[in-house]
Amino acid sequence: MMEFKTEKSSFRLMQNYIKEVRTTEGFDTNVKEWLDKFWYQIECCNEKGQKLFRLIFSSSDGYIIPKWVNHQYSQEKMKSLSPYVYSQVATLTNQADKKQLENCQRLKECLEKDTCFGINVIKFGDHYNQSSSYIQIIDFWQYGEEEQTLYYKGGVWTEKERPIKISEYRHMLEWKPHDKQIKLTNLGIGQGQKYASDAYLLFEMNYNGEVADFSLNNIIVEPDEYTLNTWVTYVKQIIDDKSVADGIPKLIKKKSLTP
């Protein structure tokens, strides 16, 4: 595996695998393909070594780290340094830490939009790298001083869902533990699509009080029992607080099934 590590950040290729997907092609609606997939992880820490951000994403490009390192350590930058700094490379590693942090902060701003799927949101340099078009955000965390989760957004799924050509999942869940807010988004993608499109919010819920403030998207019809159970499955994948995980299903059903 490949890793680029500095004092305050790391950029790691976690694993690669071959993914079987079903897509559409012409009049054939059940075409089987095999795709190479790569999983990456980025972590940013503060001066105390505590995590600030963690990001996991997938891509069909297995050379993202070398491309990113090549940008950070370009020959023009290397030649502009004094021999002493060149030997220590301190300036460049600090710059790499800064870029990692900026990327994560910028990515959070993008992810907070309900329509964000993850395409073209990781910046390698002054311009978007072509590889960015093939990146999919899987999980994103922001941490507080005690490394408690402040913000999370990532993919959720059930075992019955078939893989899609461009996606590891079809839904994205956003969780703000401090505000006790949850949002579930349908990414609006189907088999055979090259890019994601038409993402829309399914529901959002504030469980900060005794009764959850639960609202459905206006275009969504009343969810049936199967849909509600699927949503509960999604929520339980992310929230490991047992009281929340046990209470939310009842609140969703009570609120959504009330005339």
Image: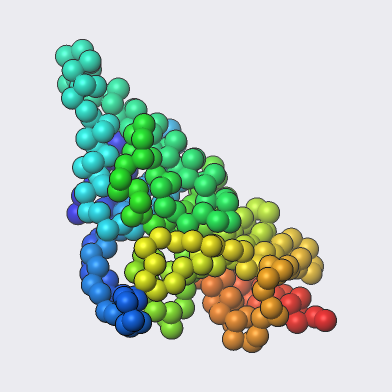
Left or right: where 69 falls relative to 96: left
Residue 252 to residue 142: above or below: below
Residue 190 x/y as whole percent: 44, 72
Residue 237 x/y as whole percent: 50, 70
Closer-to-camera residue (147/4): 4
Quarter of the image where the C terminus is located: bottom right
* Display colour scheme: rainbow
Q: Residue at x 66, y 59 (%)?
A: 181
Looking at the rendered structure, the number of numbered marks drawn on it comes to 0
Left or right: where 232 falls relative to 195: right
Quarter of the image where the N terminus is located: bottom left
Q: Residue at x 34, y 58 (%)?
A: 58
Residue 93 to residue 13: above or below: above
Res. 77 visible in picture: yes
Query: Which residue is farthest front?
Result: 27
Residue 2 x/y as whole percent: 21, 50
Closer-to-camera residue (179/60): 60
Q: Residue at x 24, y 37 (%)?
A: 69
Closer-to-camera residue (164/25): 25
Query: Which residue is farthest bottom?
Result: 225
Q: Residue at x 39, y 44 (%)?
A: 122
